[in-house]
Amino acid sequence: MDDINEIKSKLSLPSNIAIITHRNPDGDAIGSSLALKLFLELFGHRCTVILPSEYPAVFKYLPSLDSVSVFDLNQDEVRSSLSHADIIFCLDFNGLDRIDPLALNITESIAYKAMIDHHLDPEPFADWYMSDTASSSTCELIYRFIEALGHAPHMINKDIATCLFTGILTDTGSFKYGTNPEVYRIASELKKLGVDDYMINDAIFNSWTHRQMTILGHALRNRLEVIPELHSGIIFLTKSDYHKYQIARGDTEGLVNYILMIKGMHVAAFIREMPHGEIRLSLRSKGEISVQELARKHFNGGGHKNASGGSSTSSLEETITKLKEVLPEFISVLND
Ligand code: 5GP
Ligand code: MN
C-alpha cells in the first residue's frame, strides 16, 4: 500500500468523489463500491458509484444500490460525474480494459486516482495504490483501508458492513478459497456490527429461477467434456443455446465451478459463444496451476491465479481446440 497519509490528506476536505468498478460487476465490485461510498459520505464527501454495465438482481438488498449510475443506461450522467470528480477510486479492477469504454475518461481526467484492488499485475494509471493479491476481496481491502485511515470499527455501520460482507462472501465462494486469517477476523467484526449473514446468503444463493436450473441441467448433461488426462473439464454453450434457453447475463454465474467438483479435476473452463458472436472464457484452477497466465498468454485476459477470464476472436470449436493444445504446458506443475 502506498503512503496512507497521502490519501488521508486528499480526503481531509469534502470532495466530489467518483467510485468506479469493472464491467459485469460482481458482489465484490458492487459491495466494495457501495461500502466506500457510504463510508466517505459520513465525512461530507459527495460520492457517485459508477458501474460500466448493469448489476445482477440478486444484489438488490444492498443499501443505496438505487443510487448507482450505470454507464450503459445513462452515459451522459456518468461522463458528467467523472468530469466533476476531484478524486476517482478504481475498485476491484487492475486494467483499463475492464472499464472499456470509460478508459479514456479516466486517463484524461485530472482527478486524483486511487486504486484499491486484489488482481495480479495492476496497470500504472493511478496516483495511489492499495494492491494486494493475497487479499480475498476488494471488500477485505476496504475494511483494512478504513482501519489504516485510523477509524475505529464502530464507524462501520450495519449498511456498510452488509456491503463488505457481501463481497467477502462472493469472492471467497462462501469462505472456500482465497481466504486468510484476516478474512475471518473481518467477517467476525462485520457480524458484531450487525450483519445479517443468513439473509445475505439466502438472497444470493437461494434465488435461482427454474429456467436457470434448466440451463445448469443442460450444461452438465449435454455440454460438459471431461478430459481426465489433462485433469481438465470444459463446459461450452453455443449461440443457439443462448437463444433456445433465453440465457441472460448472470444465468451462467458459477457454472464453471461445478467442473472442479469432479474428483481429479484441476482446471475448469467455461467457454461461451455470446449472442453477439464474441467468445468469452471463464477459467478456474486448483493449487499451483495458473489460469491467470493461461488467460493472459492465450486469451487476452487475466484475473487471479486460480480464477481468470478472457476472450477469443476464433470460433467456439477453434477456441476449445486451442485450449486443449495449450493446457499441457500449464498442468505440467502437477508433476513437480
Ligand atoms: P469470471 O470468469 O468470473 O468472469 O472472471 C474471473 C476473474 O477473472 C475475475 O476476477 C475477473 O476480474 C477476471 N477477468 C474476467 N475476464 C477478464 C478479462 O477479460 N480480462 C482480465 N484482465 N481479467 C478478467
Ligand atoms: Mn474481487
Image (cartoon, helix red, strand yellow):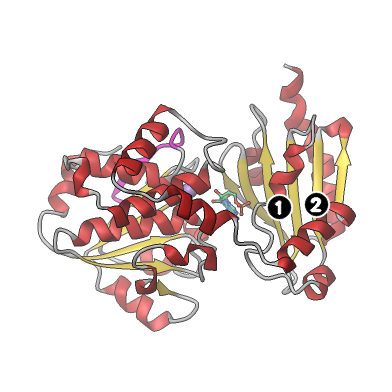
Q: Residue at x 64, y 28 (%)?
A: 287
- Tell me if 21 is positioned left or right of 240 in this view: left
Magenta part of the chain: 124-135
Classify 10 Å Cα crowding around label 2: few (below 14), some (14-19), many (20 and above). many
Viewer-closest of 234 and 205:
205
Q: Are marks 2 and 1 in contact (CB under 8 Å)?
A: yes
Residue 56 forms part of the magenta stretch: no
Q: Give the quarter of the image for residue 39.
A: bottom left
- Tell me if 295 is positioned left or right of 229 in this view: left
Viewer-closest of 88 and 24:
24
If the image is split into quadrants, where does the N terminus sit? Answer: top left
Cα distance in 3D space between marks 2 and 1: 8 Å
Q: Is residue 123 visible?
A: no
Amino acid type of the residue that numbered disc 2 sits on in the rendered structure: Ile
Residue 100 - label: none
Q: Give the quarter of the image for residue 69.
A: bottom left
- Tell me if 318 is positioned left or right of 329 in this view: right
Instruction: Give the structural element (helix, strand or loop) at label 2.
Output: strand
Mark 2 / mark 1, whichever is N-terminal:
2
Residue 255 - label: 1
**Position above or below: 63 against 297:** below
Judged by depth in the image, the label closer to the viewer, 2 or 1, is 1
Query: Residue at label 2?
Result: 235
**Position above or below: 260 against 241:** above
Give the x, y percent position of residue 285.
Answer: 68, 36
